[in-house]
Amino acid sequence: MKKVYNYLVVMIPLMALICLSSVALAQNAWVNEIHYDNFGTDQGEFIEVVLENPGSYSLSDFEIYLYNGNNGETYDVKSLDAFSEGNPVGDFMLYYYDYPENGIQNGEPDGFALVYMGDVIAGQFLSYEGVMTATGGPASGMTSTDIGVAEPGEVGESLQLSGSGSSYTEFTWNPPAPETKGMINTGQTFGGPLPEPTNYPTDFAATSTGLSVELTWTDATGEQLPAAYLVLASTENSFITPIDGTPVPDDTDLSDGNGALNINYGVENCIFDNLEANTQYFFTIYPYTNAAANIDYKTDGDPPTTDATTADILILNYENFNDTTLGTWMQYSVTGDEQYWEAQEKYGIDNSPNAVMSGFDGTQVENEDWLISPELNILLDTYNPTLEFWSATEYEGPVLEVKLSNDYTGSGDPTTANWLDVDATLSPGDWEWTYSGAIDLSELVSEETFYLAFRYTSNTSEAASWEVDEILITAEAAIGIQEHFDHERLKFYPNPANEIVFLDKRIENQEIRVFDLSGRLVKEVSAEANQFSVSDLVPGIYLLYLSGNENRKLIVY
């Protein structure tokens, strides 16, 4: 008996060591790609898993659990032996599972866990559109890690890891891109870190359209191809060189004068939009390999540079509802007190906040609700106003109406004013986000101030849901400002100015109004004045407006 007892004492730690060794090996598996949501009916949903040395394991020991973020419980489980086998890449094998239509929940948040022999593999309780805590299944009590990117995307797109390495932490998740189901992802390499790219891309060019600039290039060639590119933007012709091992995150807000985008190899263009009017922007591009701490930028030599100047356009109003309020717009309920326009946190363009209205409250309800712009100022006969926006809808109901009024007072019941119909391209349904087109409002605007609105209606048998996002109202010179000015009637000096502007005697008894480039009236100069101060104005470009439609630019510094 004593010998047997000693033998068991020796063997138990040995067996535990074998089990622990198996679990450690199993951790070199990870979720590599997912498609869970697209515009319209969700289809083509799948999850892809990477496993190193698959011959060392039984695939049935690996499972993918899908988690519901609302209650933390699992709602589906699939073992890896039910997955389709993709392509081998060295010692790694890719497996993928095609889920049925609407098989993977759409988030805010939801998640998934990759499990081996009942235990969640380290770092593989992941979620999208937020963080969640599991209350059931193998991840019970664990808090997920948000992958940081989200859908919807188009059918045939997915969220993918890119970079170079041999474990999950060496890769980075990317926004929707063409799917690579069963194959290694675009910009991804299995194995050790790669050297920096051999060459820069060529034919780097910038094209300005309105308040957007599109960058194009021809992919880099050479012995070592890049995994992706870092495109930097600035209002100054100088850039901070990226540092190896320190990824530069995307920055699409150029209000501080700088921005950045990471673009996968093979995608030879990108766009910076919502830029300042009449502003010169400079751009440069750095190719790189790997990701995360292994990222390796090509910085020797001279990176390509280019520049472009945005159009001389006035932004009358821009509203994206990203602060989860209606911002500068207001809602007014004519009929139906329980439903009204409001901002919601998700589901807008790129999963950003947007404005939404629905007449469904457990059942269809009669509603008439307006979403109304702030007062919009325009200089008549000088600028052509344009409206752009995106819309999405679902369910049966009256079509959303787009309206313009020249006599609304800015408050109170909009039905007391006269409203003209604005012809816009709207969403066909199925939650498909649709661009309105650039709508010329010139024929509808007849006063210096006007209002735009979205009129929603529903009834007791039909109540659609409508969402609106990225509203942009601009104006530009109709026939060229310099050609339209009556310089003999409207003269002033100096220009630029920073203290006092003196008025020419030819404009006696004519009132002058000063507007900023957002269309806001900032100063009125009386008919008796022969000078006025600009020391209280923020440096920038202003428009002087004289009755009779004579206009001049004034630069304040």
Image (cartoon, helix red, strand yellow):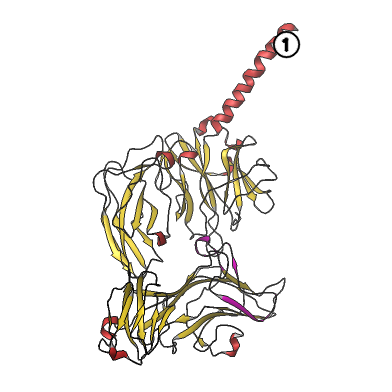
Picture coordinates of residue 155 (x, y %)?
Answer: 49, 59
Picture residue at 40% right of the left edge, 65% below the top: 273
- Give the vertical position of 366 relative to 199 (above or below): below
- Give the vertical position of 23 relative to 69 (above or below): above
- Give the vertical position of 75 relative to 447 (above or below): above
- Give the vertical position of 449 relative to 290 (above or below): below
Q: The disc labelled 1 sits on which kind of residue?
A: Tyr
Where is residue 301, by image quadrant? top left
Where is residue 546, by image quadrant? bottom left
**Residue reaching furthest right?**
1
Picture coordinates of residue 279 (x, y %)?
Answer: 32, 67
Q: Is residue 346 magenta?
A: yes
Q: Is residue 522 magenta?
A: no
**Is 118 positioned to the left or the right of 29 in the image?**
right
Instruction: Evaluate whether residue 77 shows in this view.
Output: yes
Question: Neighbour class for label 1 at 10 Å: few (<14), some, many (≥20)?
Answer: few
Instruction: Evaluate whether residue 265 shows in this view.
Output: no
Picture residue at 61% right of the left edge, 26% below the top: 19
Where is residue 120, by image quadrant? top right
Picture coordinates of residue 509 (x, y %)?
Answer: 35, 93
What residue does disc 1 label?
Answer: 5
Secondary element at tag 1: helix
**Is 131 positioned to the left or the right of 452 in the image?**
right
Q: Closest to the observer: 460 or 127?
A: 127
For the C terminus, the quadrant is: bottom left
User: What is the span of residues highlighted in magenta in the rendered image?
Assistant: 330-354
